[in-house]
Amino acid sequence: MKARIKWLDNMSFVGESGSGHSVVMDASPEVGGRDLGPRPMEMLLLGLGGCSSIDVLMILQKARQDVTDCTVEIEAQRADSEPKVFTKIHLHFVVEGRNLTAKRVERAVQLSAEKYCSASLMLEKSAEITHDYEVRDLMAV
C-alpha cells in the first residue's frame, strides 16, 4: 500500500492514495491553515469509521440481514500534551433495516472490533476504544 502527500500552500496538503483517489487536508486557522479540508487526525477517525463500517456491513450481509442504512458516529478524546494521541474513542453504530436481529448487529460490531478492523486494532494500542449500537427496525414503524 502506498500514499503520497503533497504540500499545496500555507498548511494545506493533498493526500493521494495508491488507488488513485485524492483528498485535501488542512490545518486549523490557529496554526496557519485555511480550513480547506479535514485535519489529519480527523482523517484517522474517518479511516477507523470507514474500516469498521465496511466490516459490519459485510458481516450483516453474509448473515442475510436486510440492512438499508448504516451510520457510525465517532467521538474521540486526545491527550492534553504532546504528542496529542487519541486516548479514548467511542463508535456508535446506527443500523437500519427490515427484520434486523439485534444479536447479529451486536456480533458484527464485536467481530469488527476484535478481529477484522485493522484500524481499530492498531489504534487500540494507544486509545481505549468502545463500541455500542442501536437497531432501527423499519418493520416496527
Image (cartoon, rainbow, N blue to C red):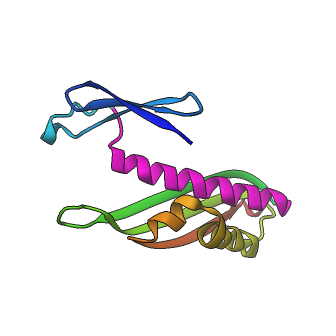
Is residue 90 within the magenta segment? no
Dominant SS in magenta: helix
Q: Classify residue 138 by image quadrant.
A: bottom right
Residue at far front of view: 2
Residue at far right of view: 64
Quadrant holding the C terminus: bottom right
Q: Classify residue 77 by image quadrant.
A: bottom left
Q: Is residue 62 left or right of residue 38?
A: right
Percent coordinates x, y for residue 84 in the rendering: 25, 61
Percent coordinates x, y for residue 22 in the rendering: 48, 29
Percent coordinates x, y for residue 3 in the rendering: 48, 37
Identify which residue is drawn at 23% across, 61% down.
83
Identify which residue is drawn at 35% across, 45% down.
40
| Closer to the camera in the image, 89 or 12 | 12
Q: Is residue 130 left or right of residue 80?
A: right
Quadrant holding the N terminus: top right
Q: Is residue 138 visible?
A: no
Q: Is residue 78 above or below residue 71?
A: below
Identify which residue is drawn at 66% across, 52% down.
54
Q: Which residues are magenta?
A: 37-64
Q: Classify residue 88 by image quadrant.
A: bottom left
Is residue 57 within the magenta segment? yes
Identify which residue is drawn at 68% across, 60% down.
56
Percent coordinates x, y for residue 18 in the rendering: 55, 34
| Closer to the camera in the image, 141 or 123 | 123
